[in-house]
Image (cartoon, helix red, strand yellow):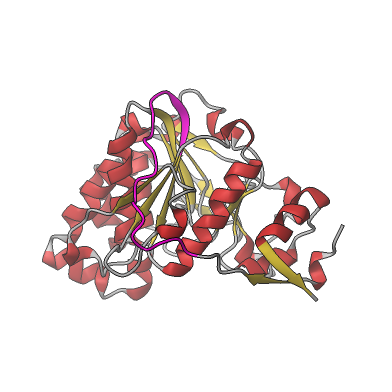
Amino acid sequence: MKNPAILILTFIHMLHLNNNALCQTSDVKENNALTYLIMINSEEQEHQAEFLISSIRRFGGIYSAMPVIVVNSDPARFTCSSLVNKANLIVNLEMPESLRVFPFADKVYACAQVEKMVAGKTDWLLWINPDGLMVAPPVEIFSDTGAWASLRPVHIQNVGIGQSQAIPEYWKKIYAMTDVDTNSLWLIESFVDNKQLKPYYNSGCMAFRPEKGILSQWKSAFETMLNNKAIYSTYSNDQYGSFFFHQAVLSAIIISKAGKERINILPPSYGYPLSLQNRQDFLQKMHYIDEMKVILCEDYQNLQYLIIGETYSSWLEKEFVYSK
């Protein structure tokens, strides 16, 4: 077993296929337990998606052959040719150009677009950020048969509302738009900094039942708010707040439409934030890759912080160059 503490992982740029390759590779058939959703908005993310899909096929267990849908956020700037023989379906994003500049707007629209496509064809739609790696079957997504959403609390508080904090104007507008009953809010605990917060969920690894329409309602609320010039100005002028706006709106939709009883909180092994591994206040760190299910790497160099057994190191050697 190699010691990852002394390894430097160098990203391999995989060879591209013909740029004229067709974007659709095969249909997404009906009666799937799970469908994976990945969005790419750069050539770097296209390469990341290759590794993510490879990890799903290798470590997804009984879910390894489930359909993978890739959304190309900006086909005018780059192709998705390297994914043609890896994803089941590649589609171009449909969204208003006027909102593209707002942080993560493409993610919101991609989720709603694919939710509509797969409703009635799959039990769960699982979004994973393109920098993610699946290292074990995602069985816990199915652990609560009554759930509409399976996801994690946020890693750190950022714009979250503390337990004793009054609801700030930032959230008041969002709650008003999404019909949240502010008298019925519960508490969650952020994973890394262990803060007690009003419901606020991470969107790096999340699954939803498509027939419930939560992602479409997310897009509708997001779009309605940003099409209001006054509201758009309020949030767009707040650099920090605008970065987390999509996640705040999603959390409000989940509160309003699903409610606490229909939320399946996934264990910390899902969407594990490897980029935060060096934070001093991160008290619930995992150190072994075989403790995890879905890792959010951000940078593959961060894998050096994990103890990687032979099962995974042999696979990684095929995907990366290891050098001391």
Front residue of this view, candidates 21 and 194 = 21
Queried whether the magenta region covers residue 21, the answer comes back as: yes
Give the quadrant of the N terminus: bottom right
- Residue 280 placement: quadrant: bottom right
What is the x, y in percent for residue 175?
27, 49
**Identity of the residue furthest to the right in this view:** 1
Instruction: Give the extent of the magenta segment.
Output: 16-35
Q: Is residue 44 left or right of residue 80?
A: right
Front residue of this view, candidates 145 and 82 = 82
Q: Is residue 279 left or right of residue 91?
A: right
Q: Residue 124: in sight, yes or no?
A: yes
Front residue of this view, candidates 122 and 178 = 122
Queried whether the magenta region covers residue 34, the answer comes back as: yes
Front residue of this view, candidates 250 and 139 = 139
Q: Residue 190: in sight, yes or no?
A: no
**Residue at x 47% of width, y 45% of height:** 206
Q: Is residue 130 left or right of residue 109?
A: right
What is the x, y in percent for residue 53?
54, 49
What is the x, y in percent for residue 91?
31, 49
Helix, strand or loop for the magenta stretch, by majority: loop
Give the quadrant of the C terminus: bottom right
**Residue at x 18% of width, y 64% of height:** 97
